Image: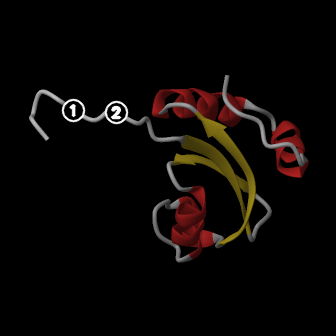
Amino acid sequence: MPHDECPPSVEKTWFVYLVRAASGALYCGISDDPVRRFATHQRGKGARFFYSSPAVALVYVEACRTRSDALRQERLIKKLKKSAKEMLAASTDVPACR
């Protein structure tokens, strides 16, 4: 392929996710592959949060169009009260970032 014919760039989907720790606490993060990231958390890697209380369940995943959108949504979720985060964890709908 001549170098003036570049393939169209494909944006990667990013996700905001909540993981429940053995202590019952919820951890919020972003990843382009939340299932892989959860497996990393289960091994006690990737976040100090899980050093003292292992990750036990991936309880919420929200798709976002860009990494910036995912970071923005993560900040919003982290500001929520625990009760609101629990409502997200209990929801069956999987929303998308706007």
For the N terminus, the quadrant is top left
Q: Are marks 1 and 2 in contact (CB under 8 Å)?
A: yes
In which quadrant is the C terminus drawn?
top right
User: Residue 7: x, y in percent?
Assistant: 28, 35
Q: Which mark is residue 6?
A: 1
What number is the disc on residue 9? 2
Task: Tell me where residue 74 sits by quadrant.
Answer: top right
Image quadrant of residue 78? top right
Q: Nearer the viewer, mark 1 or mark 2?
A: 1
Which element is circle 1 on? loop
* Residue located 46% across and 41% down the image: 12
Number of marks present in the image shown: 2
Classify residue 73 as left or right of residue 47: right
Comparing 55 with 38, the one in front is 38
**Residue type of the residue flagged with mark 2:** Ser
Percent coordinates x, y for residue 92 in the rendering: 89, 48
Residue at screen point 66% across, 29% down = 97
Q: Residues within 10 Å of mark 2 (few under 14, many from 20)?
A: few
Instruction: Name the amino acid, label 1.
Output: Cys
